Structure formats: structure tokens, C-alpha cells
Amino acid sequence: MKHIPIFERAGAFAENKDIAREIRTQEIIPALDKNEEVTLDFDRVDVATQSFIHALISDVLRKYGNDALDHVAFKSCNETVQKIINIVVEYMQEGL
């Protein structure tokens, strides 16, 4: 299992798309390629922008399809962050 604490990389206001892309390319995709489960831990993250979440997971959903959601867990999301994740996931599912 790959545990990725978002706060440590992006802070309480997760907005930097470059950080999200780095997490995706260097941690999420390599872990999924090894059939590892991934936990994205949003503990202490107050807000994440839609562009941050999109950069974090959109290519993962494109590459692995909806099956990726069976292997990626979103942990400790507050209501605001959860809503943004849901918006991005729904948007990506429309295009799959």
C-alpha cells in the first residue's frame, strides 16, 4: 500500500498543479503499475482546487479507467475537498 500525505506536499490549500502532477507521475502511477493500493491522505488539507485534483487524478482515470477508483482511496477529506473530488471524478467518467 502506498500512502501519500497531501498536506506534506501541498499544504492546507492544495492548489499547485505542478505538485499534483509530480505526485501523480512519481507516486500514484508507479504504485498502480505495481498493482499497489494507493491512499491519498487529505488530513489537514482545508481546500483543494479543482485544477489540483484534476492534475492529481485525471490521467490516472484516463490510463486505468474507472477501475482506478477501486485501487485509489481518498482519506480524511473534509466536505469541501470531497465535493471537488466528486466533481472531477464525475467529469472524467463522462469522457471515459
Image (tube, rainbow, N blue to C red):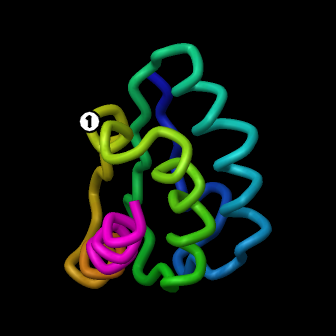
- Most extreme residue toward the left is 79
Q: Is residue 40 left or right of residue 12?
A: left
Q: Is 23 in front, or is 63? A: 63
Residue 86, above or below 76: below
Residue 53, above or below 51: above
Q: Name which quarter of the figure residue 88 lies in.
A: bottom left
Q: Which residue is mark 1?
A: 70
Amino acid type of disc 1? Asp
Q: Which residues are magenta?
A: 86-96
Q: Name which quarter of the figure residue 47 lies in.
A: bottom left
Residue 89 falls within the magenta-colored stretch: yes
Q: Is 51 in front, or is 61? A: 61
Residue 30, above or below 88: above
Residue 96: percent from the left, percent from the top?
39, 59
Residue 92 falls within the magenta-colored stretch: yes
Residue drawn at point x = 66 percent, y = 27 percent: 30
Residue 55: percent from the left, percent from the top?
62, 67
Q: Is residue 13 left or right of residue 79?
A: right
In which quadrant of the rendered image does the N terminus lie? top left
